[in-house]
Amino acid sequence: MAPMLEVRQLTVSYGGVRAIDGISLTVHSGEIVSIVGMNGAGKTSILNAISGMVPPDSGEITFEGESIGSLPAHAVVARGIVQVPEGRLIFGTLSVEENLRVAAHKRSGFMLRSRDRPHLRQLFPTLTDKLERPAAGLSGGEAQMLALARGLESEPRLLLLDEPSLGLSPKLSLGVFDLIRQLRDQGLTMLLVEQNLRRALMVADRAYVLESGRITLQGPASELMLDDRLVSNYLGVSLPETPTSD
Amino acid sequence: MIDFVQNTVDGIMFGSSYALLAIGFTIVFGVMRRLNLAFGATIMLGAYAGTWLHVHYQVNVLVIALTTLACTVLAGIYVERLCFRAVRRDAALASMVSSFVIWMQLEEVAVHLLPERTYPFPSLFVAGSFEIGPFLFRAEQITMLLLAVVMVGALHLLLHRTRYGLALRAMSENPQAAGYMGIHTEWVMLCAFALVSLVGGVAGYAILATDEQITPYFGLWATFKGLIAMMLGGMGSLPGAIVGGLVLGMVEAHSQWYLGNEYKDLSAYVLLFAMLVLRPGGFMGQRILSREELAFRRV
């Protein structure tokens, strides 16, 4: 079966400095694929290139058989690739409800109308009674839930998750990964970028290990978890837990 | 006491047009964190197009008003294309400088179109005045106030009840996040320029119809009034722009009456100076200040 997303020989650089150096990866429909790696390895750059937020230098990105490498971000979202960005980037001055509406704006008519969201009540019970409040008042965990809920509002076929557990307590990040599993069970395809290697490998079907812009290891997550090279490279050193950006 | 109330009423009426000018500056600043210095000049050029029609052809005033608005919107789109779209996202200073250059260019165009110093500007409104008790009301000024109220009401509805308004508000808070949400950010920006040009065109028309004449310096004048009103209220704040415009109008009206005509502009500058020293974020407070800081960090 042809992959849902195929990235071939992708190269991205910022001001002449190469962040991604010819990487290739595939995501099949229904899979959770994870990209793991240290800070600054270029994980976010890959997602940004796929979602059209950063123009790639070279390489091909195909989604459902069509090339999307040169499309602007809004056109990529319209095709069904939605990124939940690192640091959540929720709109603090807008209400929770408005945050969701922004993401659903393609389906809205010119005038905004209130909509019923049954799936929201089921997946995000904590958000449903705060819909009218400004999103700035949400706790970190709630804000991450809102970021995920907002991503789902755009009706993605492929969800790009950038460090969804960043800055959350261990308990809250467990909740996030629970949600990711629930979404997988509903058939959503996801490409997950994580610093937390163990969590990422536990939830993912396959994974790519990224080091300085290159993929150094890849394979089924269950095998990578037992791989000696990965253990010595990552689990030997302590991973930083503080929020930082690539 | 009667003078004081009369001045206040006059100030509010004229200040309503300052508020519209300030809204034009503040919406663009809110969305882009950049100053569009060519804003006053786009209004002037639009009004010059209307005046040109008035001078050369015998046409209905309504046609002239519509031409003024349409050409203001076109000029606004021209400025967006040249100074804001073409300039890189993180080069805010370059946008500001190039919008200043375009201001000069638009002034040149206006002078070539109609080379004399002043031209009569046709009024769509009924002139005249009436009295209620001891107070005098001018019909043009009431029309100006009504237009401003209608524009602000329509803007409020647009920003809070429509898909486009939501996208615009999302973009003013975080353009990058809006991009992730699939908002066509460049389109939203272009529409924002068209929108503020329309608001500015209405304000410009109302002011010129009250003055009944136009000079190429109208662009400079509109830029001053709009910028001062915006900074009084707080950059990027829509309610701030309204409050700032009304306060500026009232201060001008009072100082003109009590101190004399030559102190009218001076007192506006003194007010702005005092505001920037005592409360640099403007009337509408701290949140706006942090935005302003953010903007200058980007510069």
Image: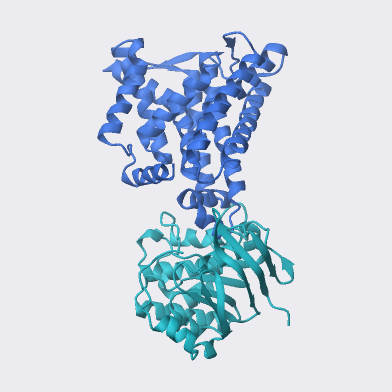
Chain colours: A cyan, B blue
**Vertically, is A92 above or below B278?**
below
Going by the image, does A14 lie left or right of A132?
right
Counting from the top left corner in percent of width and height, residue A12 is at 59, 61
Image x and y of residue A177, in percent: 46, 80
Q: In the image, is B225 to the left or to the right of B198? A: left
Q: What residue appears at the point 30 percent right and 27 percent down from the top-left corner?
A: B273
Residue at position x 64%, y 62% in the image = A76
For the residue pair A18 and B232, the one nearer the viewer reads as A18
Q: If the image is split into quadrants, where does the N terminus of chain A sit?
A: bottom right
The mark total stands at 0
Q: Nearer the viewer, residue B213 or A245?
A: A245
Note whether residue B134 is visible: no
Left or right of B162 in this view: B49? right
Instruction: Give residue B98's position: percent from left, percent from top.
Output: 54, 32
Quarter of the figure with residue B266: top left
Up the image or down, B194 lies above or below A182; here it is: above
Q: Is residue B56 visible?
A: yes
Residue lying at 35% horizontally and 32% vertically, measured from the top left: B232
**Vertical side of A115 occupied by B100: above or below:** above
Q: Which corner quadrant of the image does residue A92 belong to?
A: bottom left
Q: Which residue occupies 51% across, 63% down?
A: A100
Of residues A218 and A126, the one nearer the viewer is A218
Estimate the x, y position of residue B91 in percent, counting from the top left. 50, 42
